Amino acid sequence: MSIPKHVAIILDGNGRWAKKRLLPRKAGHVAGAKTVEQICEDAWNLGIKYLTVYAFSTENWSRPQDEVDALMKLLGKYLVDCIERSMKNDMRVKVIGDKTGLDPELVKKINELEKVTDNNQGLNFIIALNYGSRDEIVRATNRICADYKDGKISEVTADILSDYLDTKGIPDPDLLIRTSGEERLSNFLLWQLAYTEFYFTDVLWPDFNKKELEKAIDYYNGKDRRFGGVKNK
Ligand code: IPE
Ligand code: IPE
Ligand code: MG
């Protein structure tokens, strides 16, 4: 059994999970946050080294203000709780996305979390927050232009571009999972997913668990990753 080194997850279906139970959407996000906590432990126990979750997209600001407020409040609490859990589980946390678009109080929490977990040796847990792949590529391109103008770089290669992305130093995902039956990327890691295997499931994110993660890994194991070459099974 081959375990993917890096698993990326588009956690989707919190709202529908809540609706099915006649609960407000916010309750779905609370349940979804608990699932994230559990999946971090399960992923590490299965041998996964990097786990990236899509928590809030650059497009999610278009949701009703009360839902955005609830999500930001929940994220703030999550980031604080995450410090204690990360120290217990030896987890190293990094946040990707545009921090300049976030509340300064939230940014403080992110910086603190990244700083105190920086030397941890367990799971590399990456949270995509105010993240959009097009936005990331645009921000990278602007920094490349500035550095080119300043003579800091003389050319642009794929490796150099990768180093300007928020995911610098993180290997590309081997497996992408999206829950809730949607089969689209919604502006997630467009560059990094070039050769990733995709697994879609109808399970709503709050119901996702270790067994579902194992199913995704089973699916991954049935794939013949050719990276453009030729290989017989
Ligand atoms: C995913 O669940 C969580 C976020 C995008 C923050 P949704 O909130 O998108 O749930 P559905 O898709 O409406 O069911
Ligand atoms: C993608 O889910 C974003 C996150 C999981 C944070 P959405 O629910 O926002 O995506 P769409 O709108 O269905 O494409
Ligand atoms: Mg959704």
Image (spheres, rainbow, N blue to C red):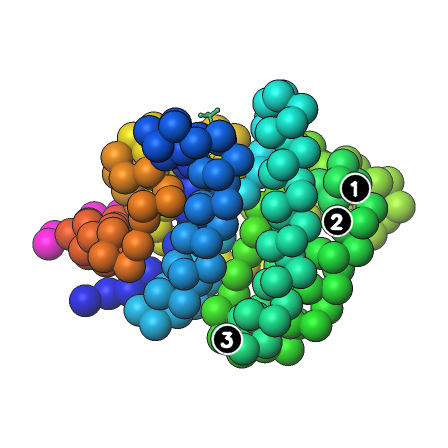
Segment tinted magenta in the rendering: 229-233
Residue 103, numbered label:
1
Instruction: Please name the amino acid that badge 2 sits on.
Output: Leu
Three-letter amino acid code at the position of disc 1:
Asp
Locate residue 44 relative to residue 191 in the image: left or right.
Answer: left
Crowd rating for badge 2 (residues with CA inside 10 Å; few <14, some 14–19, many 20+) = some
Instruction: Say whether residue 232 is visible.
Output: yes
Location of residue 46 in the rendering, given as x and y in whole percent from the top left corner: 31, 69
In this view of the protein, can residue 16 be seen by the observer?
Answer: no
The residue that appears at 24% across and 65% down in the rendered structure is 2
Q: Residue at x 48, y 69 (%)?
A: 123
Give SS at disc 1: loop
- Would residue 36 be found to the left or right of residue 199 on screen? right
Task: Evaluate if marks 2 and 1 touch, with contact meaning CB atoms under 8 Å apart.
Answer: yes
Q: Residues within 10 Å of mark 3 (few under 14, many from 20)?
A: some
Q: Position of residue 112 (x, y in %)?
A: 75, 64
Of the image marks 3 and 1, the number of the one nearer the N terminus: 3
- The quarter of the displayed image where residue 59 is located: top right
At label 3, the amino acid type is Asn
Disc number for residue 106: 2
Of the residues under marks 2 and 3, which one precedes in the sequence? Answer: 3
Under circle 2, the secondary element is helix
